[in-house]
Image (cartoon, grey):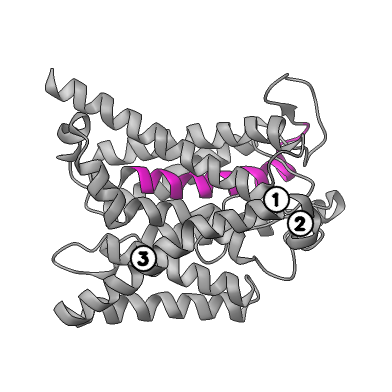
Amino acid sequence: MSVNRRHEGAPCAATTLSCVSRQTVPWDVAQPKLLWQSKLVLLLVLPIVGTGLVLQTHWWATQLPSVATWTLGLSLLLGLIVLRVHAATAAGACTGAVLTASLMFSTVGFPYLPWHTALPPVLAVSLLASIASRIGRDRKEELGTAEARHGRAAAQVAANVGLAALLAGEFAQSWMAGLHWLTPAMGRPGMVFAPALAALAEAAADTVSSEIGQVLGGRPRMITTGRAAEPGTDGAISVAGTAAGIAAACVVAALGAVSLRGDASLFWVATAGAVFGLLFDSVLGATVESRGWLNNDAVNFVSTVSAAACALALMAELAHVRVR
């Protein structure tokens, strides 16, 4: 099954640096009445993440300059590469670099190594999205759902990866640490980052399922009614597409569990949250998005929220089991 879209931007699930969109018209003119939702996503993400990044940069630069150098250097390099290959607009590349740097700072561990941060899962999301978008491109162009040539905008990047950066940040971490019903689960290695990792894995799953489903999924069916639909229809899913999406979620969750020094519990919680978010995205597409109540950026952001919420619920259950 996969989420298939054929309208305003469909930039499902991308990455901090290369979220994939399947739009045929510029995202800022496709649904002008709902453009405020894309701006709202930016407003929810960038001020908080940007402020945190400034504070993190200052702290690490004074305490351990090598961490600041590696983090800012790699994030800037990735942003420049994305801009150079026209995978994002200038604003989109900058937004991606900011989110990547924030995620890397928030997941620093010791002994410090750049690849023992959120960098590997972020790169996995980017690579998976890039490969999936190139499979069957001729077919996607016939459907009018091929990746846009002008690059991804800042709102598209923030909608897909912004929540992961927010949840990995100090404010969210402090909030979760204060939840007594999560305390036992938080003691597991890397589990504190499970909601953020679930959001990242959902981003990869959404993009891969959509891209693969349009090409290899055959005749999709609506997730709400089971009726056959055309490829690219909001909320239409196929077995092949969803299987590919789940595989992508597993890859990102596995890399995250290893790079964040987690255990099997982190992998399974993040994967389960991502799969839930993937299916919830389909439901949103078949209902509120198809009716024109939410645009694609809003749907993508809410889907990552659902993935993180599912991960939190599973963490609570793990804590309950551990207490018993």
Pointer 2 residue: 23
Q: Residue at x 37, y 48 (%)?
A: 196
Q: Of circles 2 and 3, which is in front?
A: 3
Question: Disc 3 versus disc 1: distance between alpha carbons?
Answer: 25 Å
Q: Relative to residue 231, is residue 245 drawn left or right?
A: left
Residue type at mark 2 is: Gln
Pointer 1 residue: 10
**Helix, strand or loop at disc 1?**
loop
| Mark before the other along the chain sequence, 1 or 2 | 1
Question: What is the x, y in percent for residue 108?
Answer: 23, 64
**Helix, strand or loop at disc 2?**
loop
Q: Magenta segment: does it hold 218?
A: yes
Mark 3 neighbour density, 10 Å: few (under 14) some (14–19) many (20 or more): many
Q: Vertically, is 112 above or below 131?
A: below
Q: Main secondary structure of the magenta part?
A: helix
**Helix, strand or loop at disc 3?**
helix
Mark 2 neighbour density, 10 Å: few (under 14) some (14–19) many (20 or more): many
Q: Vertically, is 205 above or below 317?
A: below
Question: What is the x, y in percent for residue 303?
Answer: 54, 40
Q: Quadrant of residue 21?
A: bottom right
Residue type at mark 1 is: Ala
Residue type at mark 3 is: Ser
| Mark before the other along the chain sequence, 2 or 3 | 2
Q: Are marks 1 and 2 in contact (CB under 8 Å)?
A: yes
Circle on res. 102: 3
Q: Magenta segment: does it hold 53?
A: no
Question: Disc 2 versus disc 3: distance between alpha carbons?
Answer: 28 Å
In the image, the segment drawn in magenta is 195-219
Q: Residue at x 19, y 62 (%)?
A: 109
